[in-house]
Amino acid sequence: MQKTHLFIAVSVFVTIATLFGILGRTNKIQAAGSLTGSDIAEIQQLYARYNQAIDFRDQDLLLSIFANDAIYTTGAGEAHAGKEAITKWAEPVMNAGPPTFTHNNTSIVITPTTDGAKGRGYWFLFNVEKPQPVPMVTGYYNDTFVKTSQGWKIKTRGSVRGWSQ
């Protein structure tokens, strides 16, 4: 009989401790913000829309993914603040004629923050002028995202060429 009471007491204790541990972790996550599956999918679409905007020379699509006060830092370290500056940066690409390269992203990780989300994903640029694509350059993006009345937008994008930290 004592073993049964001891087993029940230990089981109740473990259950309560587990619940408090789960609740504690949940509160930490909520303090940093939370993302729904729809949020994550919409943010992932920003990566794809950026790629297609550049590759298909679609300036309207490109501008639609950035917040009005966005800052884009290129892989060469040039910072462009606001949509007007981003438009000016993209002008040579948008007027370059038929696409000769494609952008591709992989391993995108999105994390909630107190004021939106942050993300990091690998990018690969391929020359597609010939039937066999040739890798040109690789790197990764460090991004922050903000949810606006028009949906999720890129607040900051830092493009890093290669793998320097």
Image: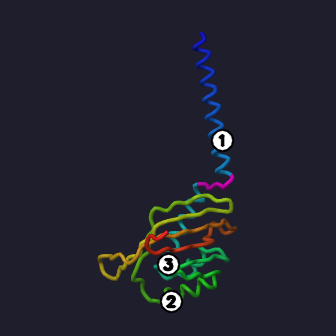
Residue segment shown in magenta:
31-36
Residue flagged by tag 3: what amino acid is it?
Gly
Q: Position of residue 161 (x, y in %)?
A: 46, 75
Residue at which label 1 appears: 23
In the rendered structure, the answer to whether residue 107 lies left or right of residue 80 reads left
Mark closest to the chain's N terminus, 2 or 3: 3
Identify the element where label 1 is drawn. helix
Q: Amino acid at mark 2?
A: Pro
From the viewer's perspective, is 148 left or right of 134?
right
Q: Is residue 88 above or below residue 117?
A: below
Residue closest to the far top: 1
Distance between the alpha carbons at the discs numbered 2 and 1: 52 Å
Q: Secondary structure at mark 3?
A: loop
Name the residue tied to disc 3: 75
Query: In the displayed structure, would residue 39 be above or below residue 83?
Result: above
The circle on residue 92 is 2
Q: Quadrant of the N terminus?
A: top right
Distance between mark 1 and mark 3 Cα atoms: 41 Å
Q: Could you classify mark 3 by the number of other residues whose Cα lies within 10 Å: few (under 14), some (14-19), or many (20 or more)?
A: some
Q: Residues within 10 Å of mark 2 (few under 14, many from 20)?
A: few
